[in-house]
Image (cartoon, rainbow, N blue to C red):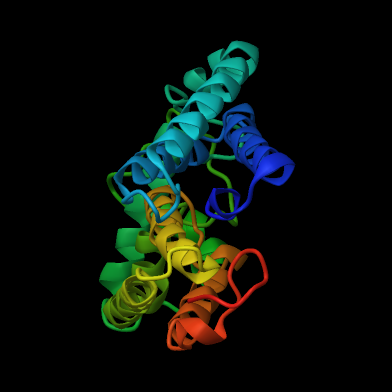
Amino acid sequence: VSLASRRSGVQRTALYAAAGLSGAATIASTSRAGVVALAVVVVGLMLVPTGGLCRSVAARTRFVLGSAVASAVALVAVGGETLARFGDQEGASGAGGSGRLNLWRAGFTAFESEPLSGIGYGAFAPRALDLQRATPSVDFRDQEPLPDLPTHSAYIGTLAELGIIGLALLVVLLATVIWAAHVAYQRTRRVPSRLTHGVAAALPVSLAAWLSMSVFLSSVATRITWIAIGLAAALWALSRTPAEKVPDQAGSRGP
C-alpha cells in the first residue's frame, strides 16, 4: 500500500490490486489469526495520517473500496468456513478453541516451574503432553491429546521457555522497532515522497498485526519478526540521510 501510494498509472493499480488480493487470500486461508491480523491492518490504515500510507483521502478511499470488494468475493467463496472456524472447539491439530486453551494452561505450568529463565528455548513442544497432563485445569474431553505441539501463543510460549527475562527482552525489542519506525517517520515528514517515509508509516501497522495474531500463534521465530527488526534498523539509518541526497520517486534529486 505504501509503495502504491508513491507510484502512478498501471503500477499503482497493480500494487493496490495485489494488496486487495492479499486480503482476500487471508480470508480464503480460513486462518483465524490471519483474519484478526487483517482486521488490525484495515483499522491501522484508517488511523495513519494521510501522506503516510495513502497520499490522499481519495487514494485511501479507492484502496478501502477495492479491498472491500475483494474481501466480499472471498467471504462469498469461503467465508462460511472461515467464520465456522471461530467457533471450532477442537481441530485436528489440537489448536482449536479448547486445544489452544489447554496448551496455554500448560504454558503457565511450565512458567511456574522456572519463572525467571524458563524451561529453555524450544523445550515446550517435546514436553507439551506431559505438561498438559500435569496441569489440573486441562480437560481432554473435547480434544485428543497430541504430542509435540507449541503453545500457540508467542507471549505464553516466551514466558514458558525463556521466563520473565525472555519476555522482558522481547517487549524491549518490539518497543525498539516501534520507536525506530516512529523516529524515521518524523524525520522524513518534510519529504513525504521518500519511500522511507511510507515504509516507516507502514511498519507499526504491520507490527500491530503481528502483535495481535501472535496471541494465537507461536510466531517469535518466524521470518517476519526479524524482517521487522531489520527494517527498523534500516529505516532509522536511512532517515538520517539528508533529503537532498535521496532520490525521489521519479529518480531525480529531492528538494
Q: Residue at x 54, y 66 (%)?
A: 195
Q: Is residue 8 visible?
A: yes
- Residue 207: image location, x then y, percent: 42, 59
Horizontal placement of 248 versus 214: left or right? right
- Residue 121: image location, x then y, percent: 50, 77
- Residue 69: image location, x then y, percent: 56, 19
Q: Residue at x 47, y 24 (%)?
A: 88
Q: Residue at x 28, y 48 (%)?
A: 136
Residue lying furthest front: 255
Q: Please tell me which residue lies in front, 253 or 108.
A: 253
Q: Please tell me which residue lies in front, 146 or 204.
A: 204
| 17 vs 76: above or below | below
Horizontal placement of 68 versus 107: left or right? right
Q: Residue at x 55, y 13 (%)?
A: 80
| 190 vs 233: above or below | above
- Residue 187: image location, x then y, percent: 35, 77
Place residue 214 in its image quadrant: bottom left
Q: Please tell me which residue lies in front, 47 or 80.
A: 47
Place residue 175 in its image quadrant: bottom left
Q: Is residue 114 visible?
A: no
Q: Please tell me which residue lies in front, 230 or 130.
A: 230
| 136 vs 198: above or below | above
